[in-house]
Image: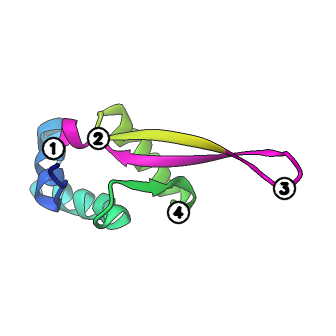
């Protein structure tokens, strides 16, 4: 299974949004997004600030990221939904 690298993300952003952005902006955006993931493909939504979440929703619109969620039951029976962001590896690569 291939791992999404910073270079992969830069190429994907360039092909998706490149007309509207300079190479420096593409590099900066790719670094910003990948800084949340590190060597993982999934992060929890709670890790994001509102501004970052807006960027992630934009990237979801361009199919570079996906969302996922799961439900957990807390002690008193209350349901808790956990949201995740996932690198869309197949689309990026």
Residue 67 visible, this orientation: yes
Q: Which residues are magenta?
A: 72-93
The span from disc 1 to disc 4 (Cα, nearest Å) is 23 Å
User: Do the residues bearing badges 2 and 4 touch, measured as CB atoms within 8 Å?
Assistant: no
Picture coordinates of residue 20, whole percent (x, y)? 18, 41
Query: Is 50 located above or below residue 86 in the figure?
Result: below
Q: Which residue is mark 2?
A: 88
Helix, strand or loop status at disc 2 = loop
What residue is rendered at 23% in x and 43% in y?
A: 89
Q: Nearer the viewer, mark 1 or mark 2?
A: 2
Q: Nearer the viewer, mark 3 or mark 1?
A: 3
User: Do the residues bearing badges 1 and 2 touch, measured as CB atoms within 8 Å?
Assistant: no
The span from disc 3 to disc 1 (Cα, nearest Å) is 43 Å
| Disc ID at residue 12 | 1
Q: Nearer the viewer, mark 3 or mark 2?
A: 3
Query: Is 25 located above or below residue 61 in the figure?
Result: below
Front one among 35 and 82: 82
Mark 3: few, some, or many residues within 10 Å (few <14, many ≥20)?
A: few
User: Do the residues bearing badges 3 and 1 touch, measured as CB atoms within 8 Å?
Assistant: no
The quadrant of the rendering that contains the C terminus is top left
Q: Earlier in the sequence, mark 3 or mark 1?
A: 1
| Disc ID at residue 75 | 3
| Disc ID at residue 30 | none
The span from disc 1 to disc 2 (Cα, nearest Å) is 11 Å
Q: Earlier in the sequence, mark 1 or mark 2?
A: 1
What residue is rendered at 29% in x and 61% in y?
A: 34
Is residue 90 rendered magenta in the image? Answer: yes
The span from disc 4 to disc 3 (Cα, nearest Å) is 24 Å
Mark 4: few, some, or many residues within 10 Å (few <14, many ≥20)?
A: few
Q: Nearer the viewer, mark 4 or mark 3?
A: 3
Is residue 6 found left or right of 63 in the rendered image?
left
């Amino acid at each position: 299974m291939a791992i999404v690298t910073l270079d992969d993300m830069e190429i994907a952003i360039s092909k998706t949004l490149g007309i509207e952005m300079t190479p420096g902006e593409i590099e900066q955006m790719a670094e910003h997004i990948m800084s949340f993931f590190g060597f993982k493909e999934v992060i929890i939504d709670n890790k994001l600030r509102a501004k970052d979440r807006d960027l992630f929703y934009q990237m979801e619109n361009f199919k570079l990221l996906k969302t996922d969620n799961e439900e957990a039951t807390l002690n008193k029976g209350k349901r808790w939904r956990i949201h995740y962001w996932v690198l869309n590896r197949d689309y990026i690569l």
